[in-house]
Amino acid sequence: MSAGAGPLLETRGLTLRAGGRCLLQGLNWRVHAGERWCLIGRNAAGKSSLLRALAGLGVPGRAGEVRWAGRPQADWSAAEAAAWRAWMPQQAADRFALPVRRLMELSVVQPGADADPLAVLAALDVAELADRAVTQLSGGERQRVALAQTAAQGAALMLLDEPIAFQDPTHQGVVARWLAGWAGERAGRAWVASSHDIHWVGRAATHVLALWGDGRWRAGPVAQMLDAPTLQSVYGCDWLAAGGSWLPA
């Protein structure tokens, strides 16, 4: 399934409300192959709600339209949607003590559509856990396995809620490098992820979508979005440039 030259993902007037509050108002936005988008904003600004809406999952108070490959979400069957977009929640909820290897096998939607799932585990530094039960993993290990599961789905678009949660600095770098290699215009793939780590966002993303949590939003390339005025406005605190990165003052 191909999007041709058009966007992989598009929103038209997307509005989200929760608890009597307007989180997002009139989002008109496009994601093209090769782009790596990070969502930034304070807690409860609507990042997770937006990712759920983009994935076609239930979100209260939603209005507007989301399109995948030029088609409205509602026009996609469940099987088509699973082959087009992959969703990684903020934290996995494991009910059964399945081995990681079996979990990866069950995550494949399009056999042969991507690299060997075990190779993905190796790239994310969790190959040695293949025979361990998922219920025996640390938080960081489980998060990297979840990312590998998402990739194994074989979709063109990955939607990732806090993919570097619980990661130490070494593995934050591992995830950033792997995600940079995974998305590509030639491969016809892109991802959208949320993160609170602005340093990591600067390393991993090509574009940023900032949410203020009161309806306002702004989107653009990383170089235009990660500056002191924008970060101060989004987070409500001062920021300092340090070694090519940004740190809260």
Image (cartoon, grey):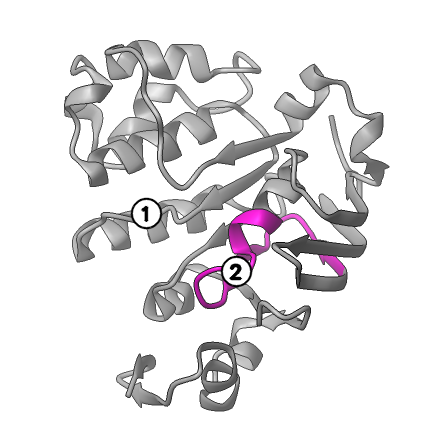
Q: Residues within 10 Å of mark 2 (few under 14, many from 20)?
A: many
Q: Amino acid at mark 1?
A: Val
Query: Sequence order check: which comes first, mark 1 or mark 2?
Result: 2
- Please, which residue is most extreme toward the front here? 20
Residue positioned 58% across, 67% down in the render: 213
Query: In what quadrant of the picture does the N terminus appear?
Result: top right
Magenta stretch: includes residue 49? yes
Image location (x, y in percent) of residue 37: 55, 57
Q: Residues in magenta?
A: 28-50
Instruction: Classify 54 as above or below 29.
Output: above
Report helix, strand or loop for mark 1: helix
**25 magenta-colored:** no
Disc ID at residue 175: 1
> Is 238 above or below relative to 7?
below
Name the secondary structure under disc 2. strand
Instruction: List the residue tagged with mark 2.
Output: 39
